[in-house]
Amino acid sequence: MRRFITLCVLSIPCFLLAQSGVGLRFGTWVNHFYRPDDYNLIQGAFSHAEIGAFYRYYKKTGGMEVGLSYLSKPQSGIPFVAQDFKGGHQTAYNAGQLTFLFGPQFDFFRPKTGYVAGIRTVPTGFIAPGIVQSPMNTFYMALPIGFSLEFPTSFGTVGGSFFYQIGMTNVKKNPFPDSDPGFDGGKMRSLNFEIFVMYGSKKK
């Protein structure tokens, strides 16, 4: 949790920039592990829900965005939005997340990349059935690559986004960080779908 608070504090200078608007996002991530057999992680996909707020600043040719989100995957699940798909597994976790995105704009089409970082509760259900449980990392980072479609309204803008997110941190915790600094604990990859509403006006 202290790491997440640190991330929030570091984002304050970005909030102080001139803004084009503040908004809300609602989304879902569909996750899977890269080469799960090599790390005794579950096969198949699982999703979690996301709700968050963001500040967005755009000039004529491009801009940036900083946001905070809450993620949730309850054991009971929510159809598609927070669900375990085929594979016979049952995952559960919550997380707080900081997102920093930037990129050019071409009218309503806006390619984006940046960084995603967060702290999640100790997740359950990540280890393959029948395998001895291993400690999981609570801190995570990912590289999002995608785009947004944003359309003007009388109060601001509305739109949707799509990202492919490449995990940058190990899913499993390194049991011997001093003697094995190159430990590979598997990576998570995700497809992120979201809709958003922003209040404000785009600055030219």
Image (spheres, grey):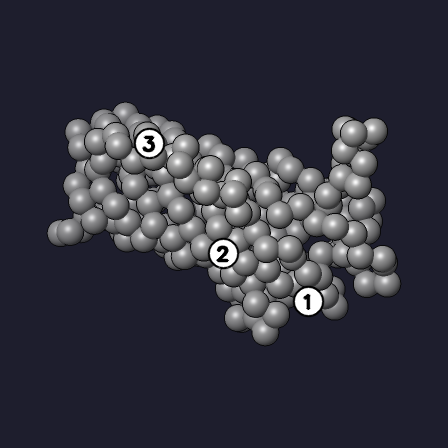
Give the mark nearer the N terminus: 2 vs 3. Answer: 3
Q: Are marks 2 and 3 in contact (CB under 8 Å)?
A: no
Say which label, 3 or 1, has the lower sequence index: 3
Gap in angstroms between the C-alphas marked 3 and 1:
38 Å
Which residue is under mark 3? 14
* The furthest residue to the left: 154
Q: Residues within 10 Å of mark 3 (few under 14, many from 20)?
A: some
Q: At which x and y percent is residue 15? A: 30, 35
Q: Secondary structure at mark 1?
A: loop
Q: Please give left or right for residue 29 compared with residue 177 in the image.
A: left
The three-letter code of the residue at mark 3 reads Cys
Residue holding disc 1: 90
Residue 37: mark: none
Would you identify the image quadrant in which residue 173 lies? top right
Could you tell me how far apart the alpha carbons at marks 2 and 3 are, in whole angstroms?
22 Å
Where disc 3 sits, the SS reads helix
Residue 194, placed above or below residue 90: above
| Quadrant holding the C terminus | top left
Q: Residue at x 26, y 32 (%)?
A: 16
Which residue lies at the image location 58% right of the left edge and 48% below the top edge?
190
Mark earlier in primary sequence (1, 2) = 2
Residue at x-position 83% and y-position 29%: 179
Q: Which mark is residue 71?
A: 2
Name the residue rendered at 21%, 49% in the picture: 199
> What amino acid type should be assigned to the residue bearing mark 2?
Leu
- The image shows residue 135 at horizontal and vertical percentages of 74, 50
Q: Nearer the viewer, mark 3 or mark 1?
A: 3
Q: Position of residue 174 (x, y in %)?
A: 76, 39
Distance CA(mark 1)–CA(mark 2): 16 Å
Residue 40 picture location, percent across and down: 81, 51
